[in-house]
Image (cartoon, coloured by chain):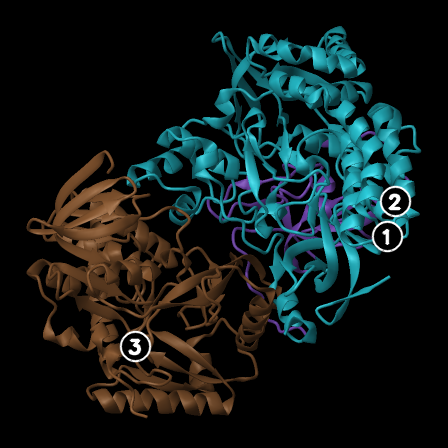
Chain colours: A purple, B brown, C cyan
Amino acid sequence: MFRKLHEPTQTVTIHIGDVAVTAEAGETLAAVLLRQAEPWARVSPVSGAPRAPFCMMGVCFECLAEIEGLGAVQACLVQVSEGMRVRRLAERRELAQEVGS
Amino acid sequence: MGAQSSIADVIVIGAGTVGAAIAYGLARKGLRVTVLDGPDTDFRAARANFGLVWVQGKGQGKQQPMPAYQALSRRSSDLWPGFNAELTDLVGHDLGYERNGGLAFCLGEAELATRRAALQRLHNALGGDADWEMLDRPALEKLLPRIRLGPDVTGASFGRSDGHVNPLRLLAALHEALLRLGGALHAGHAVRKITGGSGGVRVETDAGCHAAARLVIAAGLGSAELARQVDLTIPLRPQRGQILVTERFAPFLPLPASGVRQTREGTVMIGATQEEVGFDTSTTVAAAAKLSARALRIVPALKSARIVRHWAGLRVMTPDSYPVYAQSTTRPGAFVALCHSGVTLAALHATVIADAVAAGSLPASLAMFHQGRFDVPQAA
Amino acid sequence: MSRELDGELGIDLIILGAGPAGMAAAVAARKLGLSVTVIDEQPTPGGQIWRAVDTIAATPHADILGVEYRKGAAAADAFRASGAVYEAGAQLWQIEPGSTSGFRAFVTRDGKAWTVTARAVLLATGAQERPVPFPGWTLPGVLTVGAAQILLKSARQIPAKPVVIAGCGPLPLLYATQLIAAGGQIAGFLDTSPPGRLGRALPHLTRALAKASDLWKGLGWMQTLRREGVPVIRHVAAIEALGNGRVERVYHRTHGGAEAMIAAETVFVHEGIVPNVHVAMSLGCAMAWKESQDCYVPVLDEFGETSLPGAFIAGDGAGIAGATAAGLRGEIAAIGIAAKLGALDAAEAAAKALPRRRQLERELALRPLLDAMFRPRAQVFAPADDTIVCRCEEVTAGTIRAQVKLGRPGPNQVKAFTRAGMGPCQGRQCGYTVTRVLAAAEGRPAAEVGFYRVRPPLKPVTLGELASLDTQRSLI
């Protein structure tokens, strides 16, 4: 859906689901998502329809993804970092029952 | 005066959960009903409700136990399935009602003991079959296989008659049903004056006059002023309750609890506070923090759950916290109905109360809910 | 310098937002001796118009973005050198007034919540694009023009295939020329300005001539498009995005009835911008409906103070006026805040503000013309029944309209009964549409219908973050 104008010199590797993706250091996760074959971040919990970033500035909440285990984070406000683990949000999040500290 | 005027069998002032349920019940009996509602910005307790259809513990009271209120709640709860079925049939969509029992979680041994004692006391006063039981932690864990409970949870009381519903869908359905049955609903018609008319009452609003043989004042916190106009003195005060709601989750909590319940949509509601702050519907982070802390002691995994919305409503509180059902002596066609459990009592309101209004008098079984009980001087 | 506030050490001023207004206010407030903390949900300063200016302005990429963009670099430098505490990547989710005075702000970052208390607060949260519902607008591939521009600025990325751009106002034109300069392709430029618009704008022309150079700039952009052979369709009245799970083609129809379909996998839309008033509304600041701009603006005094003492607003959040005006308003607000906190007397404040007010007046000269020229077409506020209006909860315009038979409900009753406005965005994308749909269906003005009650949290916060605050003494 989107492409970069340049070959980034400083890159990081992130994981979207099981797929390793090369991204530019410091760009937003939403920008990375929009370059993937599946540009969507989540599906609507009402209808199951895929939703992709829309406003890129934090006022639409379409780009909600699970980032480093934390659910429903706005991907347009998060800069990618080396090794970041991202999961697209399924219809309704499972409340993981392991107890953290 | 105002351009609009109408004549009906009954005027109901207030289109909240109490007013709408009574109006629906009256319309079902074939009476012509006009409901008058205030502006969008009124306090609207009906829009802030948690959604429990609850029996356990009702009537235990902080200062004054009232077993009759437990019996009233139980009666309404037993009427609810039929009420739900008819309403759902009429409007053609679901209210999210479930009656599979409910829980009150206890943290620590003391809470468990206190809870047991309170429910036992209530039961002793009423007699009959117990529709509740105490669950220790192992029994509770069996009931909730998808949750790892926090270490402080010692158990819970389980009420068989308890359930929950989507309170907003209930309200919307009552409005819809009222209209389908030929009732009228006028929003933005705040009532200014109640007087006697020929054969009944006359009500003046900002937008017109209405006349009817009977009147029901079900205007929540606005009822005190209106009741005064029919010579009923009802002490009322607001009590603030704050509620949090989370993002949607796949189902993990199959039963509602008094402080936490998961809705059909998957969101989790957490509440509620009981604050004496006057007519203030603002929310506070302090309350959100307290509610969150307690919720995490029950279900620690909610730590990562995001709060999407936080709101506050004002409960319609009488001095002893129990409902008022009363009839004016100077204007016998005028009734008052108010409570802070409009959802639980909705079934009762649509049947027993509506019947009473139609018949022109409240039954003896509701005599203890008369507001005259507040006039009784307390023994020193 | 710190001050006692409710028995807790606080600062003089919290600024929310680090765009042109926030940055200018921070610099000015620091010069006047105030202690300042800036809370910014973006990772670097610049707001939206100068997004990522820190890293981009010095590079050749900035040539694509134009000279206005480079101005942001100087502003960001001054801001970083000002001595204001800069909390980047931090989301504010609630502001509460202190028990006697001042404010407490609740902030979250990386799963941790904390509070900042201050004697005054300045909201510089800028603007957002006006939500424009149309069939298919929730499909992946539909973005705002602002979003496309952010992607160009901060990620240096453009649509991989020819894109459809649909809208009205300077921004779609500006982006289109930037896209062409970057080597992108445009499948169609759909100008949604209705016929006769220029005629309505002419009365404002004389005042606008004070800023004539900006007008010429706009005309130049249109010529660029034509030169590049971009298909330009004027007076587009309706658009639809169609496709299976993503945009595959875009339908459009003009006022005259001419219809066509364009194959495209991305479509960028824009119908003007509106002030971001969410935080102001949550604080209960008085708002006024501005008919000529089809939006709410906060009620402010000449220094930008709201109806809530100690709470100020500057920048596009005070009313759409552009980056230069935002910077001036930020400076004026800082002066007003300093006076309020006793760092300046009234005469000094008036004297400092005066030259800035004069400059601001010149900046604002073009506004009425732009407002009239680029007023969104009526269809923006009257979506068809089956169009989704609330994206989060997928509530259609028809569902909203059906509520009207139950009396004359306000937006809060409609929210309660339909779930519109209850999703994650909490009404940011549907509030205006719901208000306008109700107004039309009920035959009363939008100003009378009102807006959703905005409740916290202003950004989602976890139960864990909230619970962690329960142990902090300062909240008791």
Q: Is residue C396 left or right of residue A96?
A: left
Q: Dot 3 corresponds to which residue?
A: B160
Q: Which mark is residue C243?
A: none
Type of amino acid at the residue the image marks with label 3: Arg
Asked if labels 3 and 1 touch by Cβ distance under 8 angstroms, the answer is no
Asked if labels 1 and 2 touch by Cβ distance under 8 angstroms, the answer is yes
Q: Is residue C435 left or right of residue C284?
A: left
Marks 2 and 3, how far apart in space? 63 Å
Q: Chain of mark 1?
A: C
Q: Position of residue B369 (x, y in %)?
A: 21, 74
Q: Secondary structure at mark 1?
A: loop
Q: Chain of mark 2?
A: C
- Camera-side residue of C432 and C307: C307
| Res A8 seen here | no
The C terminus of chain C lies in quadrant:
bottom right
Point 75% across, 36% down: residue: C48
Q: Earlier in the sequence, mark 2 or mark 1?
A: 2
Image quadrant assignment for residue C1: bottom right
Q: Dot 1 corresponds to which residue?
A: C84
Q: Dot 2 corresponds to which residue?
A: C79
Q: Position of residue B119 (x, y in %)?
A: 33, 87
Q: Is the residue B248 above or below the residue A43 in the image?
A: below
Point 75% across, 46% down: residue: C17
Type of amino acid at the residue the image marks with label 1: Ala
Q: Chain of mark 3?
A: B
Marks 1 and 3, how far apart in space? 59 Å
Front label number (1 vs 3): 1
Q: Is residue A82 left or right of residue A56?
A: right
